[in-house]
Amino acid sequence: MNILDEVKNCRTIGISGHIRPDGDCVGSCMAMALYLEKALPKARVDVFLGTFSEALQKNIAGAEKIHHEYMTDVEHYDAFLCLDCEKERLGDALDLFMKAGKKINIDHHRTNSGSGDVNYVVPTASSTCELVYTTLDERLMDVNIARNLYIGMVTDTGVFMYSNTGRQTMEIAGKLMEFGFDFSAVVREVFYEKTYVQQQILGRALLESIRFLDGRCIVSMVDRRTMHFYQATSSDMDGIASELVHTEGVCCSIFMYEIEPMTYKVSLRSTGEVDVSKLALLYGGGGHARAAGCTCNASYHDIINNLAPYIEEQLNAGVHV
Ligand code: 5GP
Ligand code: MN
């Protein structure tokens, strides 16, 4: 896909991504916005996203331009881009997307069947940022666009460690580095650095974790009272599920935090012996084979009891993803 072929005659373009946006979501949305503003100087480009971490606010170029209220004087956008998710996860931006003249969906989630009039969904891509890069004319790229894309790629590949990292990922990352931003500082600040609160919550989650299925699965939960005590928000929970799955002998981690009474945001991670996207689909969620998520309206124990047999079945079947 060449994005300019799709939107070259548009005067108003809206962009959004999934609720509780992460580095790939914010990075792809803002890289695309900066690119379109540059390529189509007469067009109006608006980005709508929920709130995100301070590290992303600081590192994503143009983050201050993002609208966190989903209000606009544009009646319907000539084109609206849904990035890094299917339309069901757009949250309050769904209405703007549905009303748009042309709906464009760019995503790398295998559970996305395509939400737009035009769909560019490639499950083998490491990240939406990797896909966005392939839609741009390199001659119009600059250091800010490059850094935003790099942040998304780093986020979704675990700094080029996860199995979604491919030759194309590394080649694109190499080209992005040549724009000359401080990639080392970006990785540290966006991926590794945690606030004190995040460290404390992570510590609690690790301390209170429980292993089951002969130590091949690990689960932990943070309830609302604890979140309130630490003044923690949902973006403070990022990374905990991945940390849990790094436990020796563990193939699958389940991390959940309470959004409302009896409603949990569930994050699932796998080292390859379990396809966690299938588990997330059971609850109407989705994601990738080794990293997926969903929102569950059930008690903590019911969620574990429901998921355990499916995990065990996959472990016994010798799945490899
Ligand atoms: P996380 O556990 O970090 O929230 O998400 C892991 C992966 O699963 C990410 O790629 C994320 O976009 C996806 N994901 C998380 N929650 C949901 C959900 O409720 N629905 C869908 N379709 N994907 C999700
Ligand atoms: Mn992504």
Image: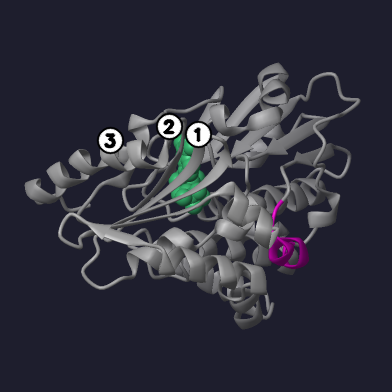
Residue at the spot of label 3: 306
CA distance separating discs 3 and 1? 15 Å
Placement of 259 over or under 65, stated as above or below: above
Q: Residue at x 75, y 34 (%)?
A: 14
Q: Position of residue 151 (x, y in %)?
A: 60, 64
Tag 2 near tag 3, CB within 8 Å: yes
Q: Residue at x 61, y 76 (%)?
A: 193
Decide if residue 108 is in sight here: no
Which of 294/189 is in front?
294
Q: Position of residue 145 (x, y in %)?
A: 70, 61
CA distance separating discs 1 and 2? 5 Å
Which badge, 3 or 1, comes first in the chain's sequence? 1
Q: Give the numbered dot on residue 298.
A: 2
Decide if residue 216 is in sight here: yes
Which of 164/32 is in front?
164
Q: Is residue 89 one of those drawn in magenta?
A: no
Q: Is mark 1 within 8 Å of ligand 1?
A: no
Q: Is residue 53 one of those drawn in magenta?
A: yes
Given the image, on which type of amino acid does mark 1 rest? Met
Which badge, 1 or 2, comes first in the chain's sequence? 1
Q: How is the image coloured?
A: one colour
User: Which image quarter: residue 196?
Assistant: bottom right
CA distance separating discs 2 and 3? 10 Å
- Dominant secondary-structure state across the stretch colored magenta: helix
User: Which image quarter: residue 306?
Assistant: top left
Given the image, on which type of amino acid does mark 3 rest? Asn
Residue at the spot of label 1: 262
159 sits left or right of 55 in the view? left
Tag 1 near tag 2, CB within 8 Å: yes
Q: Residue at x 39, y 35 (%)?
A: 111
Q: Which residues are magenta?
A: 52-60
